[in-house]
Amino acid sequence: MSSSNPALVAAATAKPHRLAGFGVLTFVLLCMGHFAIDLSSAALGGLQPVLRDRFGISLTQAGILGGVFVFSASLLQPLYGWLADRTGSRLFTVLSPLLASSAIALLRFAPDYFTIMALVFVAGVGIAAFHPQGTSLAVRGVEYKRGRAMAAFISSGTLGFAIGPSFYAALVTTFGFESLPWSILPGAIGTLLLWIYLPRDLQPVGDRASRGGSWEPIRRVWKPITLLFLLVFIRSTVQVTFAQLLPLYLNVERSMSLVMGNYLVSAYLVCGAMGGFLGGTLADRFGGKRVILWSMLGTTPCLLVFFLTNGWLSALGLCLGGAVLLFTIPVNVLMAQELAPSQTATVSSLMMGFAWGVAGLLFVPLTGWLADHIGMHDALMLLLVFPLLGAVVTTRLPNTLEEQRRM
């Protein structure tokens, strides 16, 4: 890595090289699988207003559901990342889309709140199992423009997450809650294609004697890894809480219909997908630390426009805030992978799932509780202090990979 490009490996003219069996088709299928799995990830947020009306759950209970989902889908990811590095089995990636979409489809038959909670937990297991290994495989063998490759993979998932609220809202609004079992189709198709085409041998050529699943390489770089984790936690506090509660906020506080509210949420998340792709591309050119700082400084002003205005200006602030907030997703992941290249699934799970999970487990229920006492508007707006704290933390990041490893 050159000193002018501290976070990501880049070369403007060279073509990416992939290891045996990992070509364009594999990359596209992994992106499709990521799209399907994150479509299921958005189900709970999109269905919260329906579940609230159907089962009479409170805002606090809605927050608890979100916390259970985040725990299952995110906090358990390091376990699956460690197992994926240890075993090399492709089943973590292949079966997960079907498992997650099946659990969401079965919500149609849930008799009570506690059954919903159990199904939400199972859906989270599928989501947690996919992300560490899928993220590791997405850039396997890519030597150049890794930021762009990672950004494309992550943006495919963010796009699924963006479409998810509108997909589920339109399905149950148009055809009734009884139609929810049809939502299994994207996950089933994703699993089928991955089963057929994903290479069965996931061990890199020339590295078959090595085995992952060791925490020692991560312990050697614990200081920069901790800083990167803290930055992801700060971003995720806003990201995951908004994703879970924004549909409900638009319905309760701004009197939007279920469909219109989820259309706006989808627009916000689509802009986030575009922001993630842009952030990875910018990091290839300007470096990861600089992109993270831009993201942290730019998020709060944009989202304040959303909360303090109405109409098209408010919607614009929300969409811009989503784009700027998600600049950092591919950047953080690749910076962590480069610090511990032999444990890519494990560090990916720490940077994506575990940090997301800790933030969600703490702040989704807390924000729901605050919303019951001070209103959703003020409760959500209080979260905007976190990106400003993130800007301060970003200044502590070293400028180059070599400096990070010497911390």
Image (spheres, rainbow, N blue to C red):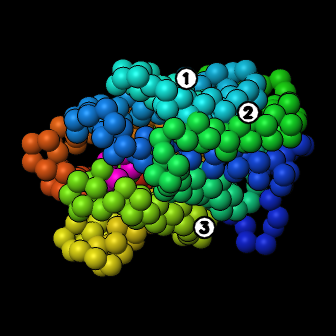
Instruction: Please provide the residue range marked out in magenta.
Output: 243-247
Picture residue at 86% right of the left edge, 37% below the top: 196
Q: Please tell me whether residue 390 is drawn above or below residue 44 in the rendered image.
A: below
Q: Please tell me whether residue 215 is drawn above or below residue 25 in the rendered image.
A: above
Residue type at the position of mark 1: Leu
Picture residue at 56% right of the left edge, 47% below the top: 39
Which mark is drawn over residue 392? none
What x and y, as percent, mark residue 204?
Answer: 82, 36
Question: In the picture, which quadrant includes the C terminus?
Answer: top left
* Residue depth check, mark 2 versus mark 1: number of the one nearer the observer: 2
- Which residue corresponds to mark 2? 94
Which image quadrant is residue 201 in?
Answer: top right
Cα distance in 3D space between marks 2 and 1: 17 Å
* Residue depth check, mark 1 versus mark 3: number of the one nearer the observer: 1
Residue type at the position of mark 2: Val
Closer to us: 294 or 382: 382
Cα distance in 3D space between marks 1 and 3: 30 Å
Which image quadrant is residue 134 in?
Answer: top right
Neighbours of disc 3 within 10 Å: few (<14), some (14-19), many (20+): many
Is 246 inside the magenta-drawn segment? yes
Upstream in the sequence, badge 2 or badge 1?
1
Question: In the picture, which quadrant includes the N terminus?
Answer: bottom right
- Which residue corresponds to mark 1? 79
**From the viewer's perspective, is 166 left or right of 241?**
right
Picture residue at 33% right of the left edge, 60% below the top: 257
Tell me the SS state at disc 2: helix
- Which residue corresponds to mark 3? 281
Closer to us: 335 or 276: 276
Q: Please tell me whether residue 334 is drawn above or below residue 57 in the rendered image.
A: below
Picture residue at 23% right of the left edge, 62% below the top: 254
